[in-house]
Image (spheres, rainbow, N blue to C red):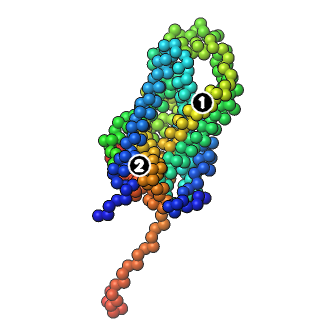
Amino acid sequence: MAVPPPAMRPESVRRAVRPVFVLACLGTAAWIAAIFLAPYLRSRSSDAGASFLYALFAPVCHQIPGRSFFFRGFPLAVCARCLGIYVGSLAGLVLYPFIRGFSRIALPAGRLFLLASSPIGLDFAGGLLGLWNSPNGLRFATGLLWGPLLPFYFIAGVTELLLWRTGRRKPSRGLPGTRPGPGLDNRGEKNVK
Amino acid sequence: MNNPADATGTQRPEYIVPALIAGLAAGVLSGIPFVNCLCCLWIIGGGVLAVRLLANRTPGNLTGGDGALVGALAGIAGALARGFMDILMKPVNDALVRRMQDSLPQFSNQMPAWLPSWLRDVVARGTPRGFSLGLFFLNLFVTAAIFAALGILGGVIGASVFGRKKTPAPPPAQAPQAPQGPPDAAV
Protein backbone atom coordinates (compact mmCIF):
# COMPACT_ATOMS: atom_id res chain seq x y z
CA MET A 1 0.00 0.00 0.00
CA ALA A 2 1.41 3.37 -1.03
CA VAL A 3 2.37 5.84 1.69
CA PRO A 4 0.21 8.97 1.29
CA PRO A 5 2.03 12.25 0.58
CA PRO A 6 2.54 14.54 3.59
CA ALA A 7 -0.46 16.72 2.80
CA MET A 8 -2.87 13.85 3.10
CA ARG A 9 -1.43 12.33 6.25
CA PRO A 10 -3.93 12.50 9.08
CA GLU A 11 -1.49 14.34 11.33
CA SER A 12 -1.01 17.12 8.74
CA VAL A 13 -4.74 17.52 8.33
CA ARG A 14 -5.28 17.37 12.06
CA ARG A 15 -2.74 20.14 12.63
CA ALA A 16 -4.62 22.35 10.18
CA VAL A 17 -8.21 21.50 11.16
CA ARG A 18 -7.86 21.98 14.92
CA PRO A 19 -7.09 25.72 14.97
CA VAL A 20 -9.80 26.36 12.37
CA PHE A 21 -12.29 24.41 14.47
CA VAL A 22 -11.34 26.21 17.70
CA LEU A 23 -11.52 29.64 16.03
CA ALA A 24 -14.88 28.79 14.45
CA CYS A 25 -16.23 27.72 17.85
CA LEU A 26 -14.98 30.87 19.58
CA GLY A 27 -16.20 33.12 16.76
CA THR A 28 -19.67 31.57 16.64
CA ALA A 29 -20.06 31.65 20.43
CA ALA A 30 -18.98 35.31 20.55
CA TRP A 31 -21.32 36.12 17.65
CA ILE A 32 -24.32 34.59 19.44
CA ALA A 33 -23.34 36.25 22.72
CA ALA A 34 -23.23 39.62 20.93
CA ILE A 35 -26.76 39.02 19.57
CA PHE A 36 -28.05 38.76 23.15
CA LEU A 37 -25.71 41.41 24.51
CA ALA A 38 -27.24 44.15 22.34
CA PRO A 39 -30.71 44.09 23.98
CA TYR A 40 -29.12 43.48 27.37
CA LEU A 41 -27.05 46.64 27.07
CA ARG A 42 -30.09 48.54 25.82
CA SER A 43 -32.03 47.41 28.87
CA ARG A 44 -29.19 48.69 31.06
CA SER A 45 -29.37 52.07 29.27
CA SER A 46 -25.89 51.56 27.83
CA ASP A 47 -26.88 53.10 24.53
CA ALA A 48 -23.42 53.47 22.99
CA GLY A 49 -22.56 49.79 23.34
CA ALA A 50 -26.03 48.67 22.30
CA SER A 51 -26.06 50.96 19.26
CA PHE A 52 -22.66 49.66 18.19
CA LEU A 53 -23.82 46.04 18.42
CA TYR A 54 -27.10 46.69 16.61
CA ALA A 55 -25.13 48.51 13.90
CA LEU A 56 -22.68 45.60 13.72
CA PHE A 57 -25.46 43.20 12.77
CA ALA A 58 -27.33 45.61 10.51
CA PRO A 59 -25.48 44.63 7.30
CA VAL A 60 -26.34 40.95 7.75
CA CYS A 61 -29.94 41.18 8.96
CA HIS A 62 -33.00 43.35 8.39
CA GLN A 63 -33.57 43.50 12.20
CA ILE A 64 -37.34 43.97 11.86
CA PRO A 65 -38.63 43.86 15.47
CA GLY A 66 -41.80 41.99 14.46
CA ARG A 67 -39.67 39.17 13.12
CA SER A 68 -37.31 39.03 16.07
CA PHE A 69 -37.36 37.48 19.50
CA PHE A 70 -37.16 39.84 22.45
CA PHE A 71 -34.77 39.70 25.36
CA ARG A 72 -35.27 41.87 28.45
CA GLY A 73 -37.87 43.90 26.58
CA PHE A 74 -35.79 44.63 23.47
CA PRO A 75 -35.43 42.83 20.15
CA LEU A 76 -32.38 40.65 19.59
CA ALA A 77 -29.78 42.02 17.19
CA VAL A 78 -30.89 39.60 14.44
CA CYS A 79 -34.23 38.18 13.32
CA ALA A 80 -35.56 34.78 14.40
CA ARG A 81 -34.44 33.03 11.21
CA CYS A 82 -30.88 34.35 11.46
CA LEU A 83 -30.77 33.39 15.14
CA GLY A 84 -31.80 29.86 14.16
CA ILE A 85 -29.00 29.70 11.59
CA TYR A 86 -26.36 30.83 14.09
CA VAL A 87 -27.56 28.58 16.91
CA GLY A 88 -27.75 25.70 14.42
CA SER A 89 -24.17 26.45 13.33
CA LEU A 90 -23.02 26.25 16.94
CA ALA A 91 -24.80 22.90 17.27
CA GLY A 92 -23.07 21.73 14.08
CA LEU A 93 -19.72 22.74 15.55
CA VAL A 94 -20.43 20.74 18.70
CA LEU A 95 -21.27 17.71 16.55
CA TYR A 96 -18.33 18.17 14.15
CA PRO A 97 -15.66 16.19 16.05
CA PHE A 98 -18.03 13.25 16.52
CA ILE A 99 -19.19 13.13 12.91
CA ARG A 100 -16.14 14.15 10.92
CA GLY A 101 -13.21 13.99 13.33
CA PHE A 102 -10.03 15.97 12.86
CA SER A 103 -7.97 13.61 10.75
CA ARG A 104 -9.63 14.33 7.41
CA ILE A 105 -11.54 17.08 5.67
CA ALA A 106 -14.64 16.36 3.62
CA LEU A 107 -17.70 18.14 2.29
CA PRO A 108 -21.27 17.03 2.95
CA ALA A 109 -23.19 15.49 0.07
CA GLY A 110 -25.08 17.82 -2.26
CA ARG A 111 -28.32 15.94 -1.63
CA LEU A 112 -28.00 16.51 2.09
CA PHE A 113 -27.52 20.23 1.47
CA LEU A 114 -30.64 20.37 -0.69
CA LEU A 115 -32.62 18.46 1.93
CA ALA A 116 -31.56 20.78 4.76
CA SER A 117 -32.13 23.87 2.61
CA SER A 118 -35.63 23.01 1.45
CA PRO A 119 -37.51 24.02 4.66
CA ILE A 120 -35.85 27.44 4.89
CA GLY A 121 -36.23 27.93 1.13
CA LEU A 122 -39.92 26.99 1.16
CA ASP A 123 -40.65 29.13 4.19
CA PHE A 124 -38.92 32.12 2.67
CA ALA A 125 -40.53 31.67 -0.75
CA GLY A 126 -44.00 31.28 0.77
CA GLY A 127 -43.55 34.45 2.78
CA LEU A 128 -42.22 36.35 -0.21
CA LEU A 129 -45.16 35.28 -2.39
CA GLY A 130 -47.63 36.16 0.36
CA LEU A 131 -48.87 32.58 0.67
CA TRP A 132 -48.33 32.54 4.43
CA ASN A 133 -46.76 34.51 7.22
CA SER A 134 -44.75 32.17 9.37
CA PRO A 135 -44.55 32.73 13.10
CA ASN A 136 -41.13 33.47 14.52
CA GLY A 137 -40.90 30.01 16.03
CA LEU A 138 -41.15 28.41 12.58
CA ARG A 139 -38.65 30.86 11.12
CA PHE A 140 -36.26 29.96 13.92
CA ALA A 141 -36.82 26.24 13.35
CA THR A 142 -36.08 26.41 9.62
CA GLY A 143 -32.84 28.26 10.35
CA LEU A 144 -32.00 25.74 13.04
CA LEU A 145 -32.35 22.90 10.52
CA TRP A 146 -30.07 24.60 7.98
CA GLY A 147 -27.39 25.91 10.33
CA PRO A 148 -25.75 22.64 11.49
CA LEU A 149 -24.54 21.90 7.97
CA LEU A 150 -22.65 25.17 7.56
CA PRO A 151 -19.61 24.46 9.77
CA PHE A 152 -18.88 21.34 7.72
CA TYR A 153 -18.42 23.56 4.67
CA PHE A 154 -16.65 26.38 6.44
CA ILE A 155 -14.07 24.24 8.24
CA ALA A 156 -13.31 22.19 5.12
CA GLY A 157 -12.80 25.26 2.93
CA VAL A 158 -10.72 27.27 5.39
CA THR A 159 -8.59 24.25 6.27
CA GLU A 160 -7.80 23.67 2.63
CA LEU A 161 -6.83 27.33 2.23
CA LEU A 162 -4.59 26.97 5.27
CA LEU A 163 -2.95 23.89 3.80
CA TRP A 164 -2.27 25.80 0.57
CA ARG A 165 -0.75 28.65 2.51
CA THR A 166 1.53 26.46 4.61
CA GLY A 167 2.56 24.62 1.47
CA ARG A 168 1.30 21.30 2.70
CA ARG A 169 -1.16 21.13 -0.10
CA LYS A 170 -1.09 22.78 -3.51
CA PRO A 171 -4.10 23.90 -5.52
CA SER A 172 -5.24 20.84 -7.34
CA ARG A 173 -6.11 21.74 -10.89
CA GLY A 174 -7.14 18.67 -12.71
CA LEU A 175 -7.41 16.59 -9.58
CA PRO A 176 -10.80 15.27 -8.65
CA GLY A 177 -11.23 18.38 -6.49
CA THR A 178 -14.03 18.31 -4.02
CA ARG A 179 -14.74 14.73 -4.77
CA PRO A 180 -12.67 11.78 -3.65
CA GLY A 181 -9.07 12.80 -3.96
CA PRO A 182 -6.42 14.41 -1.78
CA GLY A 183 -7.73 16.84 0.79
CA LEU A 184 -11.40 17.41 0.29
CA ASP A 185 -13.44 14.35 -0.39
CA ASN A 186 -16.88 13.30 0.56
CA ARG A 187 -16.18 9.83 1.68
CA GLY A 188 -17.64 10.77 5.02
CA GLU A 189 -20.85 12.23 3.68
CA LYS A 190 -22.97 9.42 4.97
CA ASN A 191 -21.83 10.24 8.47
CA VAL A 192 -23.56 13.61 8.41
CA LYS A 193 -27.12 13.01 9.39
CA MET B 1 -8.61 32.73 -18.42
CA ASN B 2 -5.93 31.22 -16.27
CA ASN B 3 -2.95 32.78 -14.64
CA PRO B 4 0.44 31.57 -15.76
CA ALA B 5 1.58 28.41 -14.13
CA ASP B 6 3.28 28.93 -10.78
CA ALA B 7 6.60 27.49 -9.67
CA THR B 8 5.06 24.08 -9.21
CA GLY B 9 3.59 24.16 -12.68
CA THR B 10 0.08 24.34 -11.25
CA GLN B 11 -2.47 26.50 -13.05
CA ARG B 12 -4.27 28.87 -10.73
CA PRO B 13 -7.68 30.11 -11.87
CA GLU B 14 -8.49 33.79 -12.22
CA TYR B 15 -10.39 34.61 -9.06
CA ILE B 16 -10.73 38.38 -9.24
CA VAL B 17 -13.29 38.92 -12.02
CA PRO B 18 -15.86 36.34 -10.82
CA ALA B 19 -15.44 37.62 -7.25
CA LEU B 20 -16.00 41.22 -8.33
CA ILE B 21 -19.11 40.43 -10.39
CA ALA B 22 -20.69 38.22 -7.73
CA GLY B 23 -19.69 40.52 -4.87
CA LEU B 24 -21.14 43.57 -6.60
CA ALA B 25 -24.43 41.76 -7.26
CA ALA B 26 -24.70 40.49 -3.67
CA GLY B 27 -23.64 43.79 -2.09
CA VAL B 28 -26.08 45.86 -4.15
CA LEU B 29 -29.01 43.52 -3.48
CA SER B 30 -28.24 43.36 0.25
CA GLY B 31 -28.26 47.16 0.40
CA ILE B 32 -31.66 47.80 -1.18
CA PRO B 33 -34.41 48.38 1.40
CA PHE B 34 -37.05 45.60 1.49
CA VAL B 35 -34.98 43.44 -0.88
CA ASN B 36 -32.48 42.98 1.94
CA CYS B 37 -34.93 40.75 3.81
CA LEU B 38 -32.83 37.76 2.74
CA CYS B 39 -30.29 38.86 5.35
CA CYS B 40 -26.92 37.11 5.19
CA LEU B 41 -28.19 34.74 2.49
CA TRP B 42 -27.45 37.37 -0.18
CA ILE B 43 -23.75 37.22 0.65
CA ILE B 44 -23.71 33.43 0.89
CA GLY B 45 -25.48 33.41 -2.47
CA GLY B 46 -22.81 35.78 -3.78
CA GLY B 47 -20.14 33.26 -2.83
CA VAL B 48 -22.04 30.51 -4.65
CA LEU B 49 -22.41 32.73 -7.72
CA ALA B 50 -18.69 33.56 -7.68
CA VAL B 51 -17.83 29.86 -7.82
CA ARG B 52 -20.34 29.32 -10.60
CA LEU B 53 -18.69 32.07 -12.66
CA LEU B 54 -15.24 30.72 -11.80
CA ALA B 55 -16.26 27.22 -12.86
CA ASN B 56 -17.39 28.59 -16.23
CA ARG B 57 -13.95 30.12 -16.79
CA THR B 58 -11.85 27.27 -15.47
CA PRO B 59 -11.29 24.07 -17.38
CA GLY B 60 -10.40 21.87 -14.40
CA ASN B 61 -12.20 20.96 -11.24
CA LEU B 62 -12.54 23.40 -8.35
CA THR B 63 -11.75 22.48 -4.77
CA GLY B 64 -13.20 23.75 -1.53
CA GLY B 65 -10.10 25.93 -1.17
CA ASP B 66 -10.80 27.58 -4.52
CA GLY B 67 -14.36 28.19 -3.37
CA ALA B 68 -13.22 29.63 -0.04
CA LEU B 69 -10.78 32.01 -1.73
CA VAL B 70 -13.13 33.31 -4.41
CA GLY B 71 -15.96 33.48 -1.85
CA ALA B 72 -13.86 35.57 0.54
CA LEU B 73 -12.94 37.95 -2.27
CA ALA B 74 -16.60 38.16 -3.30
CA GLY B 75 -17.51 38.95 0.31
CA ILE B 76 -15.01 41.80 0.44
CA ALA B 77 -16.26 43.15 -2.90
CA GLY B 78 -19.81 42.80 -1.53
CA ALA B 79 -18.90 44.86 1.54
CA LEU B 80 -17.56 47.66 -0.68
CA ALA B 81 -20.71 47.56 -2.81
CA ARG B 82 -22.83 47.53 0.32
CA GLY B 83 -20.97 50.58 1.67
CA PHE B 84 -21.60 52.38 -1.60
CA MET B 85 -25.27 51.38 -1.46
CA ASP B 86 -25.53 52.70 2.10
CA ILE B 87 -24.39 56.12 0.87
CA LEU B 88 -26.67 55.92 -2.15
CA MET B 89 -29.69 54.78 -0.14
CA LYS B 90 -29.14 57.15 2.79
CA PRO B 91 -31.81 59.62 1.63
CA VAL B 92 -34.31 56.77 1.27
CA ASN B 93 -33.43 55.24 4.63
CA ASP B 94 -33.48 58.62 6.34
CA ALA B 95 -36.88 59.36 4.80
CA LEU B 96 -38.21 56.05 6.12
CA VAL B 97 -36.92 56.76 9.63
CA ARG B 98 -38.22 60.32 9.50
CA ARG B 99 -41.64 59.16 8.39
CA MET B 100 -41.72 56.72 11.30
CA GLN B 101 -40.61 59.45 13.67
CA ASP B 102 -43.29 61.78 12.36
CA SER B 103 -46.07 59.25 12.58
CA LEU B 104 -45.29 57.67 15.92
CA PRO B 105 -46.07 60.66 18.20
CA GLN B 106 -49.56 60.90 16.67
CA PHE B 107 -50.24 57.45 17.98
CA SER B 108 -48.39 57.84 21.24
CA ASN B 109 -51.66 57.87 23.16
CA GLN B 110 -52.60 54.58 21.60
CA MET B 111 -49.22 52.99 22.17
CA PRO B 112 -49.48 49.91 24.33
CA ALA B 113 -47.69 50.06 27.62
CA TRP B 114 -45.42 47.21 26.69
CA LEU B 115 -44.00 49.06 23.69
CA PRO B 116 -40.22 48.78 24.00
CA SER B 117 -38.49 51.91 25.12
CA TRP B 118 -35.94 51.71 22.30
CA LEU B 119 -38.78 52.67 19.96
CA ARG B 120 -39.57 55.67 22.10
CA ASP B 121 -35.85 56.51 21.97
CA VAL B 122 -36.04 56.60 18.19
CA VAL B 123 -38.82 59.14 18.43
CA ALA B 124 -37.07 61.19 21.07
CA ARG B 125 -33.73 61.23 19.23
CA GLY B 126 -35.12 63.36 16.42
CA THR B 127 -33.74 63.44 12.90
CA PRO B 128 -31.25 60.82 11.80
CA ARG B 129 -27.61 61.54 12.48
CA GLY B 130 -25.35 62.92 9.78
CA PHE B 131 -22.65 61.12 7.85
CA SER B 132 -19.37 60.38 9.65
CA LEU B 133 -16.39 59.32 7.54
CA GLY B 134 -14.64 57.60 10.44
CA LEU B 135 -17.70 55.56 11.34
CA PHE B 136 -18.23 54.76 7.68
CA PHE B 137 -14.75 53.24 7.33
CA LEU B 138 -15.02 51.40 10.65
CA ASN B 139 -18.35 50.00 9.50
CA LEU B 140 -16.83 49.09 6.13
CA PHE B 141 -13.93 47.24 7.76
CA VAL B 142 -16.16 45.24 10.12
CA THR B 143 -18.64 44.51 7.32
CA ALA B 144 -15.81 43.31 5.06
CA ALA B 145 -14.64 40.84 7.73
CA ILE B 146 -18.17 39.50 8.29
CA PHE B 147 -18.98 39.34 4.58
CA ALA B 148 -15.68 37.57 3.86
CA ALA B 149 -16.60 34.83 6.36
CA LEU B 150 -20.08 34.48 4.84
CA GLY B 151 -18.56 34.55 1.35
CA ILE B 152 -16.21 31.69 2.28
CA LEU B 153 -19.23 29.70 3.35
CA GLY B 154 -21.03 30.38 0.08
CA GLY B 155 -17.90 29.70 -1.93
CA VAL B 156 -17.31 26.28 -0.39
CA ILE B 157 -20.99 25.38 -0.84
CA GLY B 158 -20.67 26.50 -4.46
CA ALA B 159 -17.54 24.41 -4.95
CA SER B 160 -19.37 21.34 -3.71
CA VAL B 161 -22.17 21.99 -6.19
CA PHE B 162 -20.35 23.37 -9.25
CA GLY B 163 -16.74 22.37 -8.58
CA ARG B 164 -16.71 19.03 -10.26
CA LYS B 165 -16.70 19.00 -14.02
CA LYS B 166 -17.99 16.08 -15.94
CA THR B 167 -15.02 14.28 -17.39
CA PRO B 168 -15.48 12.92 -20.89
CA ALA B 169 -16.28 9.27 -20.82
CA PRO B 170 -13.35 7.07 -21.83
CA PRO B 171 -13.71 5.40 -25.19
CA PRO B 172 -15.41 2.07 -24.84
CA ALA B 173 -12.95 -0.73 -24.56
CA GLN B 174 -13.08 -3.05 -27.50
CA ALA B 175 -14.42 -6.41 -26.61
CA PRO B 176 -11.93 -9.16 -27.17
CA GLN B 177 -12.67 -10.82 -30.41
CA ALA B 178 -14.14 -14.22 -30.07
CA PRO B 179 -12.23 -16.90 -31.80
CA GLN B 180 -13.64 -17.22 -35.19
CA GLY B 181 -15.19 -20.48 -35.99
CA PRO B 182 -16.76 -21.71 -39.13
CA PRO B 183 -19.35 -19.22 -40.52
CA ASP B 184 -22.30 -21.44 -39.65
CA ALA B 185 -21.13 -22.28 -36.14
CA ALA B 186 -23.51 -19.80 -34.43
CA VAL B 187 -26.55 -20.93 -36.23
Residue A98 or residue A169, whichever sits in front: A169
Position of residue B67 measured from the top left corner of the image (x, y, whole percent): 50, 49
Q: Are marks 2 and 1 on the same chain?
A: no
Q: CA distance from mark 2 to mark 1?
A: 34 Å
Disc ID at residue A107: 2
In what element is the residue under mark 1? helix
The disc labelled 2 sits on which kind of residue?
Leu
Task: State the residue position of label 1.
Answer: B138
- Residue at 62% across, 47% down: B21
Give the position of the N terminus of chain A as an image quadrant.
Answer: bottom left
Mark 2 neighbour class, 10 Å CA radius: few under 14, some 14 to 19, many 20 or more = many
Is residue B47 among what the camera can see?
no
Chain under numbered label 2: A
Position of residue B183 measured from the top left corner of the image (x, y, whole percent): 36, 91
Residue B10 position (above or below residue A142): below
Position of residue B153 measured from the top left corner of the image (x, y, whole percent): 48, 42
Chain under numbered label 1: B
